[in-house]
Image (spheres, rainbow, N blue to C red):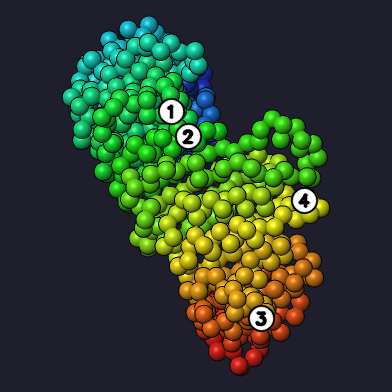
Amino acid sequence: MSELGRLRTPSPLPGDVLKRFLTQNPEAMRSWLTKLSIVANSTSPVNKLPPELFTEIFEFILAPRYGHHEEWSFITVLLVCRRWHDLAVSSPTLWTSITGDMSLQVMAAYLRRSCKRPLSVAARAETFSVPRNDFLDALVPHFNRIVRLDTHGPHTQPYFECRMERLSSLHIEDSYDPEVPKARQTLVIRGDHLPALKVLTLVALEVKPRIVNMSGSLTSLALDNMTFDTWNDLFDLLRGCPALENLTIETFEVYGSMDSTSVTTGQPIIELRRLRDFFCECRHEHDPFSFLLARLSVPPTAMMSVYAYLDTMGQQYEAFIDRSQAIDLRDTVIADIFPTDEKLYPAFPAIRDVQFSIKDDREVTVRASTVEGLRTGVASFVIDVYLEECFNHRSVQKQVQSELGTVFPPTLTTLHIYLADNQMYDTRDGYLELTESWKSLYDAFPQLEELYAAGPTLDFFTDFLSDIGPALSTRTETPPPWPKLTRIKFECTDGELDAGESEAIMQAITTSICARRDAVSVERLQHLVLVFPAEPPNLRTYLGRLRGVTEDLVCNVAGKEFVLDDPAIERVIRV
């Protein structure tokens, strides 16, 4: 058989197709090759996919996302082959994203091919390739189709002079200018013009926003880098959307004074009865957030999240020359975030669980939950405070522990304190003692039933263990704190401790808990959990001494259950 005869041709062409090639006629040859490529392409496995699946793939690869290549566009898809071109052109959902960098011809093609589907419009000023008025004029007949609009602040008002019945998400952004004059143009967002608006995001506007007649639809509001002339401007904005379920305020500034003199007398509290999530970024000053929180009335089920910063004063930072010598913290960490009158936030009296942690070099987290929040896994209050790296973490721990009792109710029943292994935990020659801050917790939360204490050093445990299980000589004079304490979990968080310090921690825990057992004024332990990253020396001996002080004894070493080969132990359960 000849070489030509051995060539395999794609179905459904007949086997003698190559014999009929008119090789002497270039135009005929080109026509044959075009037909051949179309047939070959139609037999490709990817082109046998259903049109609906093809459309979903196109939507995925063309959607903007992090790392998306700028050169990847519809041009790439349309030029692959005739089938891809036809499928893309006949899929209306692929043509619903209108941007300001389109020419009027391209924009008209998108509007035509989208076939009255809902539109997403990004009309940002810096991207316009045609006169802004021409872009707006071409878009006006399709306003009834816009469901998402991303636009630039000073040029936004013309959009809202028309009714957009289906607009559900609106993002307005402008460049931030700290020298904005106080007398500014007002941008009015009317509920009767935008009856379906649910999500509104305002970023660094130079105009003053107002929300009018937005009583029921708007459920999500985000304010980022916003500046208000007075507190009344901010409060009026919030009163204009009483149906809010999600409120985010990041780095806001008010020109007016932060005391009550800047607020019109007789103004009612801002009622946000449907609010579920509230996030605020305080930056370096906590007072504005505290003042704002004092003016809000929210349901007890709302989750309040605060992200704050805590940096050093200039003189302190200059003194921090050697980074192996951390400085002490003398500033308030969380207490000034909360208003003095906490009655407006009804979840405060119901808080039963507080978790305080420093899990990395620079962030302090305090989570507070009600009983219902513990059941659903949703905290009532979450505070994240970013720290400068020069702070001594034992000093931070001391300060936060002294503030917990001033913020949360005395009916607290669960307290978690977690400090991760950190080289800057305390690097000075003399370790900072925290016994006073622990004693403040004893007095603040007398009803405590569960304690979870995790730290990286022996000093962390000795700061309070002698109080939890007092020595025999002081047992009758000073009864142990937290007499209702029945569940305890101790965890060593430093995986690089030497054997001597690891055993010292285990010994201190054993001595304290055994002494607590002998105190007649406290409840018997129900659960005792011990967690170590590596097995301390003589662990079995210490566990043998602890087996009679609790109903359930748990020991976890390096993430695995540690079981004593001793039938005398009643029960061992997993962590």
Outermost residue to the bottom? 567
How far across and how far down the image is residue 323, in percent? 78, 41
In depth, the one of 248 and 7 nearer the eye is 248
Other residues around mark 4 within 10 Å, as few (<14) / some (14–19) / many (≥20): some
Q: Examine the rendering and report whether any part of residue 21 can be seen.
A: no
Q: Amino acid at mark 1?
A: Met
**Tags 2 and 4 in contact by the CB under 8 Å rule?**
no
Residue 400 versus residue 93 in the image, above or below: below
Sequence-wise, the earlier of marks 2 and 1 is 1
Q: Examine the rendering and report whether any part of residue 209 can be seen.
A: yes
Query: Which residue is the site of mark 4?
Result: 427
Q: Specify the label residue 258 is tagged with.
A: 1
How far across and how far down the image is residue 368, in percent? 45, 54
In depth, the one of 211 and 440 nearer the eye is 440
Which residue is at a point 71% across and 41% down the rendered structure image? 390
Cα gap from disc 3 to disc 4, whole angstroms: 33 Å
Cα gap from disc 3 to disc 1, whole angstroms: 54 Å
Query: Which residue is the site of mark 2?
Result: 287
Which residue is at a point 77% across and 51% down the rendered structure image? 427
Cα gap from disc 2 to disc 4, whole angstroms: 32 Å
Q: Secondary structure at mark 1?
A: loop
Query: Which residue is the site of mark 3?
Result: 472
User: Mark 3 or 1, which is nearer the eye?
Assistant: 3
How far across and how far down the image is residue 337, in percent? 48, 41
Q: Amino acid at mark 4?
A: Thr
